[in-house]
Image (tube, rainbow, N blue to C red):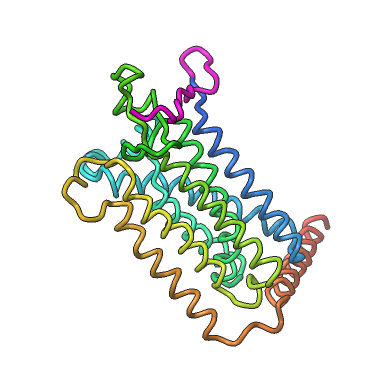
Amino acid sequence: MNLLSITWDWDPVLVKFGSLEIMWYGLMWAVAILAAERICYFTFKHEGLPGRTLESAFIWIVLGTFIGARVGHCLFYEPEVYLADPIRIITGIREGGMASHGATIGILLGIWFFTKRNNLPFIWGLDRIAIVAPLSGAIIRMGNLFNHEIVGYPTDMPWGFKFLRCFEDRVLPEALVPARHPAQLYEAICYVLTFALIIWLYYRKDLGRRRPGFLFGVAMIGIFLTRFFIEFLKERQVDFEAGMALDMGQLLSLPFIAVGIYMIYRSMRRPAVTDVNAVVDYANRMYAAEDKKNAKKNGKRGK
């Protein structure tokens, strides 16, 4: 028995109003979105972009995140359930189930729609979301910690957590609950370090503008290489993973890691951008032309 373990009995319910429960996990999602919005605001302001750019981007990214996370979980982890009853993807949302790989795909689609509608380079959008993604991921992993889910294998390490409300262990007396790797905490720490590296590369080295695609590549490798290795410490998430050499989380991470490597290679093979304000200048000209067009239209209506 590990006498140095940390007993974790955090109530997943933040507040309860009758039958309505507000979970810490939900709060962490809200904090992650708010943090992403604030960081994007300062990033866009730093580059001289108008506020409307952020508003448009934020709507598409949030929609992509939630739709992708939900659909990704249903298709990647329980396809037999949700393909037989697709409407449950929506009606069963209170049962839980969000997948980070699905969220990533949804975010990429959201960025694609946003950049397409605003005539901005897709790769420019990828680099901007790369700045906020690791921190948001870390905050959501803290939500998993509060929720006593995505736990690791038993360990004798002094920082092992006894998850008293964990599904696997909640039927056991406290003395018999094994200390486990806090896999959520491991991921959160690695994501914060990735975020710090990207912030340094963006502000100190200006790689977000000089080397298009570089920051996105770093984010993909930092997030999904972390995920790949920490999966070796996690308990099996779904039954069909039994006997698999790599679990679903690892298999889904490999394409993102490959994309990250390619994006860094691509960005370094091309000449560095010299006109770092080209995208911002173009966006401002586009918005000015749009304002002028709208003013003319409104003027005609007023006559």
Q: Which contiguous range is marked in magenta?
A: 1-20
Image quadrant containing the N terminus = top left
Q: Viewer-proximal residue, 259 or 233? A: 233
Instruction: Provide residue 168's location: percent of width, then percent of height.
Output: 29, 28
Q: Viewer-proximal residue, 73 or 191? A: 191
Residue 133 placement: quadrant:
bottom right
Left or right: 2 in relation to 117: left
> Magenta stretch containing residue 11, yes or no?
yes
Instruction: Provide residue 179's location: percent of width, then percent of height.
Output: 36, 32
Q: Viewer-proximal residue, 277 or 284? A: 277
Q: Viewer-proximal residue, 15 or 155? A: 155
**Vertical order, 153 against 4 (above or below):** below
Q: Residue at x 57, y 38 (%)?
A: 30
Instruction: Provide residue 241's location: percent of width, then percent of height.
Output: 21, 47
**Vertical order, 102 against 108 (above or below):** above
In this view, the residue farthest toward the top is 18
> Magenta stretch containing residue 73, yes or no?
no
Instruction: Provide residue 141's location: percent of width, then percent of height.
Output: 48, 42
Image quadrant containing the C terminus = bottom right
**Total of numbered circles in the picture?**
0
Q: Residue at x 50, y 27 (%)?
A: 23
Residue 53 placement: quadrant:
bottom right
Q: Residue at x 34, y 39 (%)?
A: 89
